[in-house]
Image: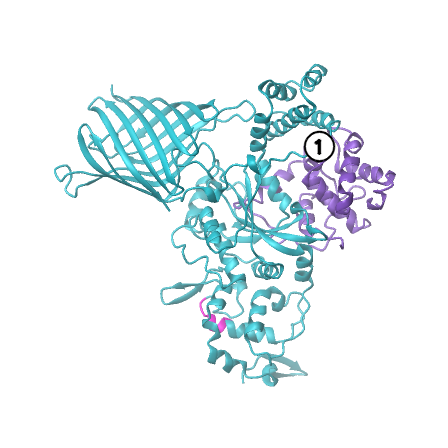
Amino acid sequence: MKKVLLTAGLTIALSGTAMAQSGPGCGLGSMLFKGKSGTVNHVLASITNGIYSNQAFGMSTGTLGCDTSQPIEYTEVAAYMDANLDQVAVDMARGEGESLDGLATLLDVPASERAAFAATAQANFTRIFPSAETTRETAVEELMAVLREDEALAEYALNA
Amino acid sequence: MRCTAIMVAGSSWVCASITTAQPDWMAWVEWHRLYEQDEWHKILYYESTRGGVRSQADDPAFFLAREGATQPKSELIASIEHFLAEPSGSDNPVHCRFPRRYDWLKSQLPRTLTWPDVECPELSAFIEQAAPKGMTLVYPASYLNNPASMFGHTFIRVDAEEEGGQRNDLLALTVSYGADVKPNENGFVYAFKGLTGLYPGSVRSHPYYLQVQNYNELESRDIWEYPLHLTADQTETFIKAAWELKDINFHYAYLLKNCSYRLLSVLEAAFPELDLVSEYDAYAVPIDTLRTLERADLLDEPHYRPAIASRIAYLRHRVPTPGNKLARRLVDDGVSDARQQALTDYSQDQQGNVIDLAYEYSRFKAKRDEGDLAEVSYDLLRLRSRYPSGELKIEPEDWPAEPLAGHGIRRIGLGGGVWRDRPYGLLSFRPVYHDRYDRQAGFLKHSQINALNSEWRLVDGSDSPFGIKLDRFDLVDFSSLVPYNPMTPAMAWTGRLGWQRSSPADAQLPFGASLGLGRSRQLTENSTVFLMAAFEASSRPEFSYGIQAGWLASLGDDKRLGVELRSTDSLLTDDSRLRVDATYNHPLSRNQAIRTRIGYHRDDDTEGWNTRLQYLRYF
């Protein structure tokens, strides 16, 4: 299946990044257990049916706030991880979970390989999330490195 | 022949009738009175008003005719004219802004008409991204701490197609209507504007994972997902109907034209053969809109997505009491070597449960801003990663009853009682919502949400000229008696505002407010006790304080029993008042019950027993 650009998620996730990008990727990514310096909570709060949201239909073709040298697939994964870092971390620690499965979907891991993907992620948890201050950039980088080192999963690593 | 476009040729204006080559659609439209069709009215959200119709879309951008908001015929003709014309070269032609009505008009008008070829890249990309396979109605449950959320919320999730089935739900797109409220809006302004329909409102689309995080984690609300019996093609039609509402204002009104009502109206615009909205004229409560969809045979069995507090409660019950204590201390006091060692007292599965419980507790605690728990949460995750894999999943047998299993929100009561040997007839009516003796299934546990509840006593003529006396009329009567637990600490509270006679002997019906604040504890698996400080002020005049306490139990499947006491002393006089009630509610079916209450009342003017029996009907 073609890679689907989650522009809605992209726009929402990145709307908090008012700062200029510093390095590859999509501006400063979120950090484990801290979100994007408080903006995640604000963004989340804007979802509730009583609070103003200026993103009616989050459609924007692409790389809002992102370093345009990055391929679309990387931006997609980065945006998802920014918004779901905590959820992916706990699923990886448990070796199974819906948020981790969402990440696998974005990486185009087929259903038959998802269990192996989850097991490998769990086995390498402390490498992918080395500390309580792990950033999205580190987590994504390390996860790609882990995938590349695995014969069966290497093809799903992003070439970032 | 009307002039439908003006082109400049050189220095002169030329009127071009683009429709000259087309069949006379105008005559066809007149002959068939297409603009009077129910379907057209639903697609444009027209509602009947005195002397005509008016669209519920409060936005001129929604219409192609100047008077389109009140003239379905003008709007229809203007729409056909625009759609038959070649797109003007703007990057958002009307054919792409209004795909729902464009599709409908094309399907209704004669096949001999030729329509221009229009590309809509943004819409196509959105539909491709959504990859529609079906739709799910998502219902985040009640949230008592916010009036806007007290009755739940409803929105649509577009389920996506993937090889081998349905794509991960978290990645799905959602369509939700809500009020556009400025951040940090003053509470009273919000209440006033919300009730009077002064807020603009719009339809938004977000990925489902953001919704789940907001409801499950931030607000700790359970989510129920009801798949809808709709095909992929129908879902695409719904997307087009929702697309027309992009950036269009529909004023939001808390009571009727709210999220749930608007959602039903968009479903009608997409599927005009459905009749969903006509039964709502005064107020629309989300659970009622779910019932409307159920009656239309649109809902499938729901899926439960637990809130963080529900996951904690679930794990607390799976783990023995010492394990609960260990989980708490792992977070409150840190993941020390000694505590890690203590884990080994449990089976491997239970060790995983204890760590999971500790982790969930650490995030719940962090949410309440109690210190930085990142290190603790991280240590727990690192620990967990060494255990065999296992998703935290609550199986259906452990799910609470689904919202549609609950009783109807309106309740009428008929019965009688005896006060100090004098019998009386009793009539009660409550338009909304649920109290602590009603059958509990399907409602937020330990909560009571009553509004506009009234009780009438039928007496013999000597007491009152009409033979009927109002004993109470509550504007609001809420309570939350969630049992305290160190991991999910909560205060027990009650609040009431309205008119109330203190006993049948009370000649006055003062307006007042009462408040209770304290704590509730789980006593046995099926019963709780509570103790609160009570305060009351009324127009009697009266200011009093005291205690309110009680024991509440669930018996068998759904019977409720409770004993409550309220003892207050007046600040203004030497008066004191004591009230003790024992209440028993016996459901006969989902929507019927028998309730009996035996009460003792004593104050400085009167004393006596008040016993009553009522047949209750919910709808």
**Residue at label 1?**
A94
In this image, B128 relative to B281: left or right? right
Q: Residue at x 38, y 33 (%)?
A: B437
* Residue extending furthest toward the left: B462
Please tell me which residue lies in front, A40 or B352.
B352
Task: Give residue B308's position: percent from left, percent from top.
Answer: 59, 33
* Total count of labels: 1
Q: Residue at x 57, y 30 (%)?
A: B314
In this image, B597 relative to B242: left or right? left
Chain letter for the cyan colouring in the rendering: B
* Quadrant (top left/top right/bottom left/bottom right) for the N terminus of chain B: bottom right
Task: Give residue B423's position: percent from left, percent from top.
Answer: 19, 33
Please identify the dominant SS of the magenta region.
helix
Q: Is residue B576 magenta?
A: no
Image quarter for residue A117?
A: top right
Task: Give residue A150's position: percent from left, percent from top.
Answer: 86, 39
The colour scheme used here is by chain
Tell me if mark 1 has few (under 14), some (14-19) or many (20+) residues whose alpha carbon lies within 10 angstroms of its own: many
Chain letter for the purple colouring in the rendering: A
In this image, B246 relative to B185: left or right? right
Task: Please indicate, yes or no, whether residue A66 appears anywhere in the rendered image.
Answer: no
Span of residues in magenta: B70-75
